[in-house]
């Protein structure tokens, strides 16, 4: 009887842990969306060929290159912290990057180094894919690709940022949400 009680207690504990992990992820995501500060990132053209086409829209930000003094210091896939600010035009500017999490004030995003090129570090943002219903993704990607080549109409993503976390909120094309354009 005692062995059975122990097994039931272990089962309950394991079940609670399995529920707690995704619940915590959902809580963090929702917390950033609710209380995080919203930023706008201009999008840039991206190669339309993607093996997962139809499941998400692959995004590329204009602000994905940051000038650095020494390229030898940065490694591919290394975790970095990007200090960001809103420019007068309403879009984001990355003004500094570091390996250390900023301790005081300011908005920042935890990201990764993608690769180095011409005295710049190319950033791999944590929000480079916009997921949506599979049947709508090909049309959304077509609209995104067309809009990213049109410099007259600013297309962008809105991202909520809080304590280094960043959550993609919406993809805006020609002033309208991608959800409304389909």
Image (spheres, rainbow, N blue to C red):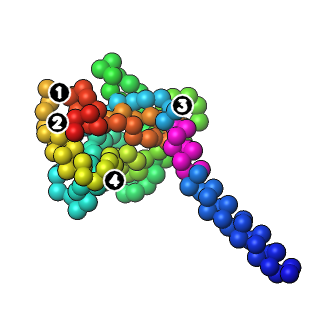
Which residue position is annotated with label 4? 114
Q: Main secondary structure of the magenta part?
A: helix
Q: Which residue is drawn at 24% across and 55% down?
A: 54
Q: Position of residue 106 (x, y in %)?
A: 51, 29
Q: How many marks?
A: 4
Which residue position is annotated with label 1? 153
The residue segment tinted magenta is 24-32
Check if mark 1's residue and mark 2's residue have beta carbons within 8 Å. Answer: yes
Mark seen at residue 35: 3
Q: Distance between the residues labelled 3 and 2?
A: 30 Å
Q: Which of 144 and 100 is in front in this view?
A: 144
First in sequence, mark 1 or 2: give its number.
Answer: 2
Q: Is residue 28 magenta?
A: yes
Front: mark 4 or 2: 2
Q: Residue at x 31, y 54 (%)?
A: 115
Please, what secondary structure does the residue beneath circle 3 have? helix
User: Is residue 58 visible to the viewer in this orientation of the structure?
Assistant: no
Task: State the quadrant of the C terminus.
Answer: top left
Which residue position is annotated with label 2? 147
Q: How far apart are marks 4 and 3 (CA)?
A: 29 Å
Q: Residue at x 17, y 52 (%)?
A: 48
First in sequence, mark 4 or 2: give its number.
Answer: 4
Quadrant hosting residue 140? top left
Check if mark 1's residue and mark 4's residue have beta carbons within 8 Å. Answer: no
Please, what secondary structure does the residue beneath circle 4 have? strand
First in sequence, mark 3 or 1: give its number.
Answer: 3
Task: State the quadrant of the N terminus.
Answer: bottom right
Check if mark 4's residue and mark 2's residue have beta carbons within 8 Å. Answer: no
């Amino acid at each position: 009887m005692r062995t059975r009680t122990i097994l039931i207690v272990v089962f309950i504990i394991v079940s609670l842990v399995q529920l707690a992990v995704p619940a915590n992820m959902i809580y963090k995501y929702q917390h950033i969306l609710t209380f995080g500060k919203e930023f706008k990132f201009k999008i840039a053209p991206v190669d339309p060929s993607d093996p997962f086409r139809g499941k998400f829209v692959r995004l590329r930000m204009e602000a994905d290159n940051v000038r650095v003094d020494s390229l030898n210091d940065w490694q591919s896939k290394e975790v970095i912290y990007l200090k960001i600010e809103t420019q007068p035009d309403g879009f984001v500017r990355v003004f500094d990057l570091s390996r250390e999490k900023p301790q005081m004030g300011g908005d920042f995003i935890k990201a990764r180094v993608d690769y180095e090129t011409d005295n710049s570090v190319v950033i791999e943002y944590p929000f480079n894919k916009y997921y949506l219903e599979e049947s709508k993704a090909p049309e959304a990607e077509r609209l995104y690709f067309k809009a990213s080549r049109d410099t007259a109409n600013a297309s962008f993503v809105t991202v909520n940022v809080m304590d280094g976390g960043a959550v993609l909120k919406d993809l805006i094309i020609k002033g309208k949400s991608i959800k409304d354009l389909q």
